[in-house]
Image (cartoon, helix red, strand yellow):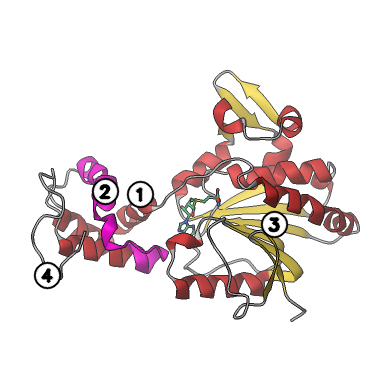
Amino acid sequence: MAVAAGSQAGLVPDAEFAFTAADFRKIAALVHGEAGIVLSEGKAHLVYSRLAKRLRGIGLRSFRDYCALVQSDAGADERIAMIAAMTTNVTRFFREPHHFDHLRTLLPPLAAAARAGRRLRIWSAGCSSGEEPYSIALTLLDAMPDAAQHDVRILATDLDPNMLTRGRAARYSRHAVAQVPPALKDRFTVAEADGVAICDAARALVQFNELNLLAQWPMKGRFDIIFCRNVMIYFDEPTQEGIWRKFAGLLNPGGSLFIGHSERIATERQPFDLVAQTTYKLRGHR
Ligand SMILES: C[S@@+](CC[C@H](N)C(=O)[O-])C[C@H]1O[C@@H](n2cnc3c(N)ncnc32)[C@H](O)[C@@H]1O
């Protein structure tokens, strides 16, 4: 759908709420500015359907009023809710299982170093509802059952506060947990009346924090491994390039970066070497 400049015509025929090209452009600019997410013109229907629920909930009559709200100081909370409504949170346990096979090979030396007193840090950036950081935690506990006795942590961050609440709750449907390898499921999950809980030992390893990858990053220490999968696809190229570079600056020498199946890093411009499918290693020592 072409979104003509200045058009006041409704973008969605017979819509409950008036939604013009100007409204779409304002929302797309805000979402891009705040979260780096690119909403192409073809996404107008998606934007309408996701945000119409918010308008109904707040009791607004048009997207014009909604745009005024989210652009105002008083609309700060609604701006966060709008960005959350525009994100795609699809995830699953042990998504792209080859990453977890590779992770398993990285852990023995890191576990040995942690036992000798060194920190071991893994970051799941864009963690959604927690399936990714808990897949890392289960793999880690399997390789290092004594992880809790050492300085070992998994940081899980996302910009969507609703996803972090779900991650902290650590409760999933039986269907979701069916993706967990049986040996890990038996040892590290607990069946409950209406689903499955992640065991306390795995939960204790994971710290969920809100973080917009486009904002300032507060962490000081470096990471051994970063997972940032299926997040960059929503960003434009300059934003992606900037974030890959920031990841490089936060990795320990020889650290690893796992990215999504449809993403790639331009290794001619970034200090990473491709070492396995969508798996990169920080090049050299800086
Ligand atoms: C498709 S999910 C991917 C989840 C998981 N990494 C995986 O691969 O299964 C993308 C996640 O990125 C988050 N996200 C989108 N833009 C973000 C940003 N600017 N900063 C942090 N997280 C963001 C979304 O809220 C969403 O939970």
On screen, residue 108 versus residue 136, left or right, reads right
Task: Give yes or no for contact between labels 2 and 1 (Cβ–Cβ under 8 Å).
Answer: yes
Quarter of the picture containing the N terminus is bottom left
Label pair 4/2, CB-CB below 8 angstroms: no
- Report the mark closest to the observer, 4 or 1: 4
Say what secondary structure mark 3 lies in. strand
Q: Give the left or right position of residue 142, taking residue 128 as reference.
A: right
- The quadrant holding residue 280 is bottom right
Mark 4 or 2, which is nearer the eye?
A: 4
Q: Of the two numbered discs 4 and 1 on the same chain, state the one appearing first in sequence.
A: 4
Which residue range is magenta in the image?
31-58
The earlier-in-sequence mark between 3 and 1 is: 1
Q: Is residue 53 above or below residue 250?
A: above
The residue where tag 2 is placed is 51
Q: Secondary structure at mark 4?
A: loop
Q: Are marks 3 and 1 in contact (CB under 8 Å)?
A: no
Q: Is mark 2 within 8 Å of ligand 1?
A: no
Looking at the rendered structure, the kind of residue marked 3 is Ile
Query: Which residue shows up at 16% across the image and 47% down it?
Result: 60
The answer to which of 75 and 89 lies nearer the viewer is 89
Figure check: 192 above or below 73? above
Q: Earlier in the sequence, mark 3 or mark 2?
A: 2
Question: Which label number is shown at residue 6?
Answer: 4
Give the residue pinned by disc 3. 122
- Gap in Å between the C-alphas at discs 2 and 1? 7 Å
